[in-house]
Amino acid sequence: MNIAPELEDRWDRLKKNAQRGLMECLGISITDLQHGYVKASMPVDEPVKQPFGLLHGGASVALAETVASLGSAMLIDPGNERAAGMEINANHLRPVRDGVVHAAASLIHRGSRIHVWEIRISDDRERLVCISRCTVAITPA
């Protein structure tokens, strides 16, 4: 994993205190963590497929919200603030049957109470699979 040195302690604390959740169930792995930028991967296997054998759109949305929320969590004061997704949209552009998808989230607005992220999800061949925008609320702890 590539992580900005100044985020290492915060990431370690987050992992230590995290509960088992959707990230683990879907096999999401964070691969790059920087200020205002997060990358992750997710295998396209049975837990994330819909009944017709394709990547489920909901799994793509879960991946998108995961990287956006995590990105915001790295930018706030964890003792006094919390980050939580409040709105997300997604356009599913290409079906995926297998392999791994890769999400890249870029911060496009950083307000005091709202962060907006653009998330691009691509397949192993770097073809765009899904484009998403997620608004994250920053609230008092």
Image (tube, grey):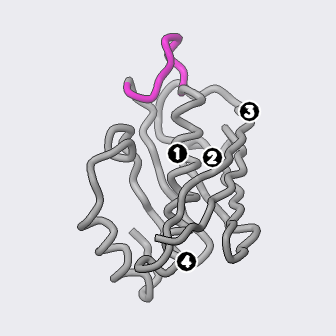
Query: What kind of residue is marked 4?
Result: Leu
Query: What kind of residue is marked 2?
Result: Ile
Q: Which mark is residue 121?
A: 2
Q: Which mark is residue 93?
A: 3
Q: Do the numbered discs 2 and 4 sit on residues whose CB atoms are within 8 Å?
A: no
Residue at x 45% of width, y 43% of height? 42
Query: Is the residue marked by circle 3 packed among few (<14), some (14-19), or many (20+) residues within 10 Å?
Result: few
Q: Do the numbered discs 3 and 1 sit on residues whose CB atoms are within 8 Å?
A: no
Query: What kind of residue is marked 3?
Result: Leu
Camera-near label (3 vs 4) is 4
Magenta span: chief secondary structure: loop
The furthest residue to the top:
52
Residue 27: x, y in percent?
A: 36, 43
Camera-near label (1 vs 2) is 1
In whole angstroms, how far apart are the C-alphas of marks 1 and 2?
A: 9 Å
Residue at x 71% of width, y 57% of height? 118
The residue that disc 1 covers is 63
Pick whichever of labels 3 and 1 is earlier in the sequence. Answer: 1
- Judge left or right: residue 48 versus residue 105: left
Pick whichever of labels 2 and 3 is earlier in the sequence. Answer: 3
